[in-house]
Amino acid sequence: EVQLVESGGGLVQAGGSLRLSCAASGITLDDYTIGWFRQAPGKEREGVACIESFDGTTYYADSVTGRFVISTDNSKNMIYLQMNSLKLEDTALYYCVATWNSMARLDSGLYDYWGQGTQVTVSS
């Protein structure tokens, strides 16, 4: 059974940083495209970042490029999202995701496995 369990969310002031973590079980990270999505109240779900299993290419939403970094520790089966220079508009529920599709990019419909989410709230 595949499980993705996020942690690390919280309340942070604008301009601050947070690191989200995702503990993956039931999968080998090398074999899966993994990533992070987010959804704010009243807004559509948005792909934030991913690492494709095809060749390790990373993709980021334009809104987070240069501020967020996705990484993995395959020895620990962990996925991370380092978020810097946080803005009010980054406030959302953040989900860790995974898929067999080696070139899923940030297409939410292609991700098979989703965690329960961790809340990030950025205050002014």
Image (cartoon, helix red, strand yellow):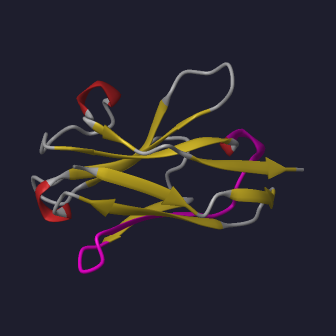
Which is more toward the observer, 96 or 60? 96
Residue 69 on image: x %, y %: 46, 63
Q: How many marks?
A: 0
Taking the image as drawn, is residue 59 in sight?
Answer: no
Residue 77 among magenta residues = yes
From what the image shows, is residue 122 above or below residue 93? Answer: below
Taking the image as drawn, is residue 101 in sight?
Answer: yes
Which is more toward the observer, 19 or 66? 19
Left or right, residue 53 beside residue 70: left
Instruction: Give the magenta part as a residue range.
Output: 73-89
Residue 3 on image: x %, y %: 32, 52
Residue in the picture at 70% in, 42% down? 91
Residue most toward the front?
Answer: 1
From what the image shows, is residue 76 above or below residue 68? Answer: below
Residue 83 among magenta residues = yes
Snapshot quadrant of residue 17? bottom right
Residue most toward the bottom?
Answer: 75
From what the image shows, is residue 75 above or below residue 65? Answer: below
Residue in the picture at 16% in, 63% down? 28
Residue most toward the right?
Answer: 124
Which is more toward the observer, 55 or 110? 110
Which is more toward the observer, 31 or 61? 31
Residue 109 on image: x %, y %: 29, 24
Left or right, residue 78 beside residue 68: left
Residue 72 on image: x %, y %: 32, 69
Left or right, residue 62 beside residue 2: right
Left or right, residue 119 beside residue 123: left
